[in-house]
Amino acid sequence: MTGSAANENRIAVVGSGPSGFYTTEALLRSGVPVTVDMFERLPVPYGLVRFGVAPDHPKLKQVTTAFDRIAAMPGFRFIGGVTIGDDLTIDELREAYDAVVLATGAELSRALDIPGEALPGSHTAGDFVAWYNGHPQFADLRFDLHHETAIVIGHGNVALDVARILAKTADELRRTDIARHALEVLAESRIREIHVVGRGGPAQARFTAKELRDFLELGTCDTCVDMGNVSFDEFEPRSPDDPELTEKLSLLRAFSQAAVTKPRRCVFRFGLSPVALRGRDRLEAIAFKQESGAVEDIACGLSLSSVGRKTTPVAGVPYDAHRGVHANVDGRVAVDGSVIEGLYVCGWSKRGPNGTIGTNRGCGIATAEAVLADITHRRPRSDTPDALLARLTGRVARIVSYLDWRTIDAAERHRGAALGKPREKFVSIPDMLAAMDA
């Protein structure tokens, strides 16, 4: 697609993760004459699916086939390698498009805000995930796994992802799309004990039974529960009408009674809140406060905190600091409850980091409906998408099309095939751009 007819509504979607694609699909299937330009700061699409989904969960990544079908719809254009708020301002987009939809996700990890958090050896789980998934901004991070004990703080699905990756051997990960640099570091890991620690009880844990079930299949790691702050009756579901919770508690009960015979072990711990990270020159232990008020130190050399995420603020867009999202009312960006014309938000940057990939579909449809309900009332704009892109070519190194991405994709698959992997990702932007011309 190159340009748009005069009677078409021009819409910009900022971000190419699940919510961006689902919103785009709803717009293009609406029956209303629209064109959608999807802006992405990286040369590659898919957002959370590429850089957030664990490499040993390949079935979750099959959703990209649906995204590719959306990208093939008439009226769609991918504009990669462009950062909104830097290369282009929000005001420039609003002057060129009838509506702008922010689908920027929740990339920032929330801090623990406790003493010692800056010690070497202390990291966020989000950084670790982006590192092993080959995100260009995180590929050069260093994680020291030459310690026997690691602590994962948090009881969500991301916490379980990072614990599971630490618990697996290199052979268990070798046939996945994990980044090569991460596989090399994990292959030399000396970690033998992983504590997954949360402040609530078993029933309050936010991870799903499906994620917990994966721990039954670890080749060289046993899973157990530390019963220090837990009683066995906490594994009994309060409501028989909640099969998800029933299965989760049943699995935890089984783990609490399991024998520990393998060389590694993953220990689930409950009722502990972190109060300080301790160490002289680097992390040596984490102090946790029990519900009784007693403080327990757990020695470790690596900490990965997974206590929530928030949206990166964008210049010119109101921000809800408390919720960590773009300030909005039901998907319409707003200041103090007053809606800003033509500016919308969807996905995690609308509602916060909750739900599954599929949850973003309903969220995207709702935002698309808001856009279409408002769009006939918009005032005329002073610019056009094509004129904007013409100016943009002088600001960025290269604008990446979806066809360009397909070339990168083919190169990654080719690299992976030689290693028995689904793909070997390029982990730097220069390498991605070079693959387009190979």
Image (spheres, helix red, strand yellow):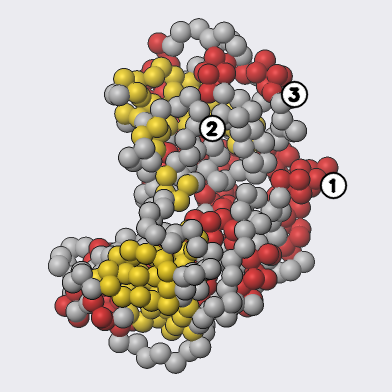
Residue at the image position 15 percent from the left and 67 percent from the top: 238
Which mark is on residue 14? 2
Quadrant (top left, top right, bottom left, bottom right) of the N terminus? top right
Q: Bin the neighbour count of mark 1 within 10 Å (Cα to Cα): few under 14, some 14-19, many 20 and up.
A: few
Q: Separation of disc 1 and disc 3 at Cα?
A: 23 Å
Q: Is mark 3 on a helix, strand or loop?
A: loop
Whether residues under marks 1 and 3 lie with C-beta atoms below 8 angstroms apart, the answer is no
Residue under pointer 1: 438
Q: Where is residue 198 in the image (x, y as percent from the top left)?
A: 32, 66
Residue 164 can be seen in this image: no
Q: Which of marks 3 and 2 is nearer the N terminus?
A: 2
325 in relation to 200, above or below? above
Q: Is mark 1 on a helix, strand or loop?
A: loop
Where, by quadrant of the figure, is residue 195 drawn? Answer: bottom left
Which mark is on residue 394? 3
Q: Earlier in the sequence, mark 1 or mark 2?
A: 2
Q: Bin the neighbour count of mark 3 within 10 Å (Cα to Cα): few under 14, some 14-19, many 20 and up.
A: few
262 in relation to 345, above or below? below
Q: Which of 437 and 340 is in front in this view?
A: 340
Amino acid carrying label 2: it is Val
Q: Where is residue 205 in the image (x, y as percent from the top left)?
A: 29, 64
Residue at the image position 64 percent from the left and 32 percent from the top: 82
Q: How many marks do you count on the picture?
A: 3
Amino acid carrying label 1: it is Ala
Q: Where is residue 211 in the image (x, y as percent from the top left)?
A: 40, 66
Q: Position of residue 421 (x, y in %)?
A: 68, 66
